[in-house]
Structures are given as C-alpha cells and as structure tokens.
Image (spheres, helix red, strand yellow):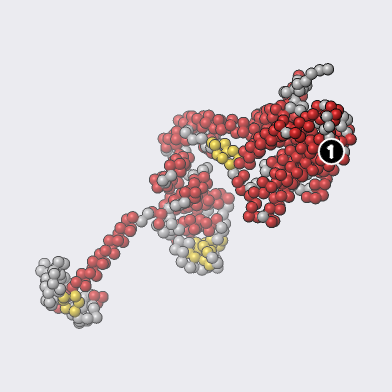
C-alpha cells in the first residue's frame, strides 16, 4: 500500500499524490496547513475543484465536521422518529379507497395498526365523500382542489376517475379507524371520546394499536379503559387461551356494553357464538359477574325514577290538595291549570330568546313566578265567575269545571296552535351526574325533586304559620263561625283557589323541563292527582306527600315487570281496594263528633 502523504504547514501536494486521492492532514496540528489542488481537466473529482488554487486545511476540516454532524443528526432522527410518522404509500391509499369491502377493510386495519400519519385525513375525506380513485391512485378533494392521497401534493384526477362510495358497513369501519387514531391525541377529552367510540367496534387487528396507546397513556382511568378495550378485542382472537384471558379480564367490568358483548359471544355456535367449551365457561362466569354488579345500578335507577315520578305527582297534586282537599271543589280543570303554567314558561323562554339572549340560561328564574301568577290569575277569575256559585254542589262543580277545561284547551290551541311547542332546558339543567356505569341522574330530574321539596315546604309554612293560612283553615273547617269572627270568607275563597291554581302552574313549569308541552298536557295528570289526594287523605298535606312518592315508586316497579299500561291498571286496582278498606285515606282528619 502506498504511504499516505502527510501535509505540514505550507507543504504542497504533488499532482501524483492528488491523483491517488489519498492524503492525511493532522487534526490537532496547531499550525495552519494548506494544499495545492491541480487545475488540469484530469482531476478525479471535479466536484471538489475550488475556484481558487489553494484551500485552507482548517476550512476543509470544518466543512467535513459539519457534514459529519448532519449525518449523525439524521441517523438519530431516523432512530427516534415514531412509527406513527411513517408516510402512507400510494398503494395503501388506493387499497383503502378502491376494491371490495373486505379488501378495503383489511387494508384499512393494516394501516391503522401501523399508525400512518396521513391516514386520518384520508379517512375523514372518505367519510365526507371527497375521494376519487383511478386504477392506481386515490385523490382527495381539499379546499376546492385535488391532492394525491399519499403525498398531499396537488394532482388532478383523470376523467376516468370515479367517486368512492361507502356503504354503512364501510362507514362504521372508517369511523372506528378514525377513533383508533385519536387514541394518540394530545387532548385528554379527545382520547376519552375515542375510547367511547371504539366500544363495540374493536377487532383483533387493533390489538397492536391499542397496546401502543396504553403504553403511552398517562391518565390512569383512560389506561384502565384501554385495557378493557384490549380485552374486548381479544374476546374474538384466534387463540383460545387469549379469548379465555380476555373473558377473565372483562369479568371485572361494570359496563353494560360488556354484558351485551358477552351475551352475544354466548350465542349458539351456529349463530356466530363461541364454540370452544372452555371459552364458553369463562364467558358465562364473566357474564354472571358483570350482571351481578350491574344489578345494583338497575335497582338504584328504578328507585330514582320512582322518586322522580313521585315528585312530579306531588307537584301536580299539591294544588289539588287545597282546592279539593281543603275547599271540597272537584276541579276537573286542574290539569288545564298545569298546562297554563307550562305555556307561561314557553312564553317567558321566547321573550328571553328575543330580548335577552345573553341571559337565556336564566329564563327559568323568571318563568317560575310567571307561571305561578298566570295560573293563579286564571284560577281567581274562575272562582269569582263560576265556582263561587257552586260551593256545596259537587256534581254541578264537576260538570262546570270539566266544561271549563275544554274551553281552556281550545283557547290554547287558538293562541299557540294544536301542535306541541318546544321548551328548551337551560344549559345548567342539561346533562347529568353519572353515579354508576349504568346509572346517570339527569340534572333536570334532580332539579324537579328539589323544586318539589321547596314548594312543599313553602306551602306547608304558608298554611300553618301565616295569617292567610289561618283564615283558609278557619273558613274551610267552619265557614259560619269564621264569618262571625269577621273573616271575609268570599275573599279567602278566592285567595285559596288562586293559591291552588298557582301551585298547579308551578307544576306545569316543572313539567315543561322533562316532557312535551301541548294543549293536552294536563289530561295525563288530572286522574293521577285525584288518586294521590284521595289515597293520602283529603285535606292532609302529609298524606299527599306519602301517597305521591309511594305511587310513583310502585308504578315504576310494576312497569319493569308488566309494562306501562298494565302497571297503570294495577295501580288503579290497588287504590280502589285500599279505599274500600280505608275510605279516609292514609291520614284521616282528626276531630270530634257532635
């Protein structure tokens, strides 16, 4: 081997040595050194030929060091670059967009498992029906122009390109794939939503992606949900031991979706269920454990819905407890007074939407007094014009108030139309509190329960502790004696009836937050209101409370067993039997016989 010449200081390299292309310059030589470069056309590497004949060796050394650093940085970047940043190839994009569904789904799942960076925009474009394909490539419509799906470079599809059409099955797979890619989002809310979207859609092909997402997840709750997703995907894996392990992991869940999945896997093998006996035993054990855990949430849900229905019945019956229980008026128009309160709430909502849109979430604060005053005013007018002439004549009162109810319903139809109107919940009454996986307590139901309690406390204090309440009790118990004591009985009758009508209006305001508002709203509560008052004891507010809550819970328990219609019939039969045995209701009036 020819020795490599060493250049020191101002030595010159001979042309023959340059032609050999080998030289060595000491890196730690303190003195500057240079070498001469030949300028003939026989140079071995013209790219190295400088414009000057002499190049400083320290400058060359700096350039070579810079190139070495760039190469090292490139190697490190290639080693550390995550797999999710690998580019989608044109062949993969075309396979996802064109062909039969089975082949497209297989290509899609393969790309999702690899976590390609350009996959999410392509999936979104497919969901938006903004993709064309030709024989080799896929094109995405973006901001009015087409780009190549794999590279993102502008590209005009040929005239022979066809639009991609996705059926419901393919759309479901695309949505699941997009949710799977969102598992790597930096936003915790987006990852949580992606996990929720993937439930019931995971497949064994997603296992590598789910494992990577679980490894990167920092939120403990989301990590547990990802572990559950992995088990849901493994429940249909090819290996039996993997399916058994997945079933055992799912046994600790309290999610209704897991129960549905296990039930589906336990279907007969001919219907697509599990065929391996060992796996079926594991699935059955998991199903029993999940069902036992969910049963507590279902029981609590029945109790809550019963209490919620009882609070609604209580609101509807409290007004009737005054007009019928204390005054003895069989008011068949009580349901229409509830309806008037609901329509007053609708009118206040529209007023806020038109003139105070920034305070729309607080329209309910104005609707509560408005519904009370509107229904109380209508009740006072009815008492002064019709009912005052019918005290002590129950049959005539029943017929008259029934006719008034028809008039009120027709009047509402003339003013607001025969169709139901929409009353929106305020933002703070939307949603609910999730107590268990299968038990969510809606905010509007919780608010109605609290509102019914406040109305009950307010009415009790009004009747028992105020001067008006004293006069009402005196007039209803002994009208002649109250008149002899100087009480204006006619005025008290009007105020008492207006109070009962106003409470009915409050019930309508509450009902507008949980159901439809229409001219027939009150018809569904008039019979129930009378049943509550009669069962609790005429004139007994405490009896009204117990009867409302009891009938609500019993009705919901029977609904789960026999259905809504049969449950209503059974409740009515129970009330009839109860009244036969105890005509005065749960709480009888205490008094002395003459």
Residue at position x 43%, y 58% from top?
Answer: 88
**Quarter holding residue 497:** top right
Residue at position x 41%, y 46% from top?
Answer: 218
How far across and down, in percent of the image, does residue 563 sit? 68, 32
Residue at position x 72%, y 39% from top?
Answer: 507
Instruction: Look at the picture and state if 168 lies above or below 333.
Output: below
Residue closest to the eye, 395 or 252: 395
Q: Is residue 164 left or right of residue 119?
A: right
Q: Is residue 180 left or right of residue 469?
A: left
How far across and down, in percent of the image, does residue 220 sit? 43, 42
How far across and down, in percent of the image, does residue 516 sit? 71, 44
Instruction: Indicate the quadrant containing the C terminus: top left, top right, bottom left or bottom right.
Output: top right
Residue closest to the eye, 450 or 123: 450
Check the image and name the residue furthest to the top: 594
Q: Residues within 10 Å of mark 1 (few under 14, many from 20)?
A: many
Residue closest to the eye, 183 or 517: 517
- Determine which residue is flagged by label 1: 383
Residue at position x 46%, y 66% from top?
Answer: 153
């Amino acid at each position: 081997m020819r020795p490599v010449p060493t250049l020191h200081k101002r030595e010159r390299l001979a042309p023959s040595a340059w032609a050999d292309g080998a030289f060595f310059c000491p890196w730690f030589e303190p003195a500057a050194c240079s070498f001469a470069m030949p300028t003939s056309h026989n140079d071995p590497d013209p790219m190295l030929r400088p414009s000057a004949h002499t190049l400083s060796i320290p400058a060359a050394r700096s350039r070579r060091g810079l190139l070495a650093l760039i190469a090292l940085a490139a190697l490190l970047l290639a080693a550390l670059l995550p797999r999710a940043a690998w580019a989608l190839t044109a062949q993969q994009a075309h396979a996802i967009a064109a062909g039969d569904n089975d082949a497209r789904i297989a290509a899609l799942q393969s790309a999702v498992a690899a976590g390609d960076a350009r996959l999410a925009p392509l999936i979104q474009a497919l969901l938006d029906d903004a993709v064309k394909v030709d024989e080799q490539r896929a094109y995405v419509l973006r901001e009015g122009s087409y780009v190549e799906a794999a590279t993102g470079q502008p590209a005009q599809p040929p005239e022979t390109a066809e639009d991609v059409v996705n059926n419901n099955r393919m759309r479901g797979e695309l949505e699941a794939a997009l949710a799977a890619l969102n598992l790597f989002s930096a936003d915790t809310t987006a990852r949580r939503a992606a996990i929720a979207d993937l439930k019931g859609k995971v497949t064994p092909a997603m296992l590598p992606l789910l494992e990577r997402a679980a490894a990167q997840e920092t939120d403990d709750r989301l990590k547990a949900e990802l572990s559950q997703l992995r088990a849901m995907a493994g429940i249909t894996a090819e290996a039996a031991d993997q399916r058994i392990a997945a079933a055992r992991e799912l046994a600790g869940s309290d999610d209704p979706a897991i129960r549905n999945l296990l039930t589906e896997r336990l279907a007969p093998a001919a219907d697509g269920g599990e065929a391996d006996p060992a796996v079926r035993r594991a699935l059955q054990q998991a199903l029993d454990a999940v069902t036992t855990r969910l049963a507590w949430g279902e029981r609590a849900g029945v109790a809550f819905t019963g209490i919620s229905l009882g609070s609604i019945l209580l609101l509807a019956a409290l007004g009737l407890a005054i007009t019928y229980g204390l005054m003895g008026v069989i008011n068949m128009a009580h349901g229409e007074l509830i309806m008037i309160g609901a329509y007053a709430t609708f009118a206040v909502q529209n007023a806020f939407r038109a003139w105070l849109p920034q305070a729309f979430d607080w329209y309910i604060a104005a609707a509560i007094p408005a519904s009370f005053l509107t229904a109380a005013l209508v009740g006072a007018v009815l008492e002064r014009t019709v009912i005052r002439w019918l005290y002590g004549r129950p049959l005539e009162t029943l017929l008259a108030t029934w006719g008034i109810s028809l008039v009120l319903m027709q009047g509402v139809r003339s003013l607001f139309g025969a169709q139901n109107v929409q009353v929106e919940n305020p933002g703070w009454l939307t949603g609910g509190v999730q107590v268990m996986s299968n038990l969510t307590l809606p905010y509007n139901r919780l608010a109605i329960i609290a509102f019914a309690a406040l109305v009950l406390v307010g009415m009790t204090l009004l009747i028992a502790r105020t001067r008006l309440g004293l006069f009402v009790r005196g007039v209803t118990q002994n009208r002649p004696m109250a008149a002899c004591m100087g009480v204006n009985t006619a005025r008290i009758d009007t105020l008492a009836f207006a109070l009962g009508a106003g409470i009915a209006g409050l019930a309508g305001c509450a009902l507008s937050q949980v159901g439809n508002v229409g001219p027939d709203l009150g018809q569904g509560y008039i019979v129930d209101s009378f049943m509550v008052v009669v069962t609790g004891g005429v004139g007994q507010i405490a009896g009204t409370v117990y009867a409302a809550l009891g009938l609500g819970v019993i009705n919901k328990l029977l609904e789960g067993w026999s259905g809504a219609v049969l449950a209503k019939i059974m409740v009515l039969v129970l009330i009839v039997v109860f009244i036969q045995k105890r005509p005065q209701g749960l709480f009888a009036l205490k008094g002395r016989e003459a």
